[in-house]
Image: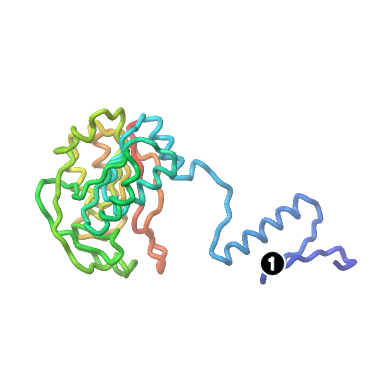
Amino acid sequence: MGESGIREARVRQFKITFRDHSPVNMVKTLKNIVKQSLKHAGLNLTRYDPLRDPSKVLRTFLTRADVNLVLDVGANTGQYAKWLRQSGYTGRICSFEPLKSAFEVLRRNAAADRDWDVFNFALGAQAGTAILNVAGNSYSSSLLGMMPRHAEAAPESGYTGSESVVVQPLDDIFSGLAAGASGIFMKIDAQGYTREILIGARASLHVIRGVQLEMSLTSLYEGEALIGELICEVARFGLSPVFIRPEFTDRETGQQLQVDGIFFKL
């Protein structure tokens, strides 16, 4: 340190000059150094805020609504159910996944959890069969055709094949699933097929206390309902938005393409 009283600190290529030697200001400067270094490495340092934490917010509302049954629609390999367990949820989970390869992994993941049941069919507006378009990354597989905007933003999601799957409306099976449940929550991540699932669940939605929906801001699948229509649809059943978080962003343009919305009867 020179006699001029100016102190310098270096972190990688960052150069910080301390002109105010007070402890408070030096701590602030060092925090800025750390933040800049982390950003250079692709990381961001912020103070933890439970009101911005999706798992904390959802867990709070699940507890308030006395939810002990979660319907995990579009489960893929069980990522959401695992996240629920890590968040502290201990009630029943019923996961629905029509894609055969993903379902086999889902079934293995749920095998050791006695309160986690899995079903190898899709939910929709009418009972029958449908053709599922299989995506290269599996979790973008959909009963709808994929729009160019989606493929441009996520080239790995392009369709690689198709398979026939069984489709059932939730209303047809709801009474058996809901037996013994004090409160029910439904999450839908069905790649553009949300409206059809809600149509097949209209009787059940009078009982369901909360939903989580994947919602597109622009058309990513052929004929899908966008965010405005979906918010209006669940509002008919007294479900109000309590939390919205970004989900899918075009990393080239920065455009937000999908969000997850959590809704509850307040």
Who is closer to the viewer here, 107 or 170?
A: 107
Q: Position of residue 106 (x, y in %)?
A: 30, 52
Q: Position of residue 222 (x, y in %)?
A: 20, 60
Residue under circle 1? 11
| Residue 4 relative to residue 239: left or right | right
Q: Position of residue 37 (x, y in %)?
A: 62, 64
Who is closer to the viewer here, 94 or 159?
A: 94
Kind of residue indicated by mark 1: Val
**How many marks do you count on the picture?**
1
Q: Residue placed at 19% from the left, 62% from the top?
A: 133
**Display coloring:** rainbow
Figure quadrant of residue 144: bottom left
Who is closer to the viewer here, 231 or 9?
A: 9
Q: Position of residue 45 (x, y in %)?
A: 58, 55
Identify the residue at the far front of this view. 112
- Work out which quarter of the rendered image holds the C terminus and state it: top left
Mark 1 element type: strand
Q: Residue placed at 28% from the left, 50% from the top?
A: 107
Q: Residue placed at 11% from the left, 46% from the top?
A: 126
| Residue 185 relative to residue 131: left or right | right
Q: Residues within 10 Å of mark 1 (few under 14, many from 20)?
A: few
Identify the residue at the far left of this view. 128
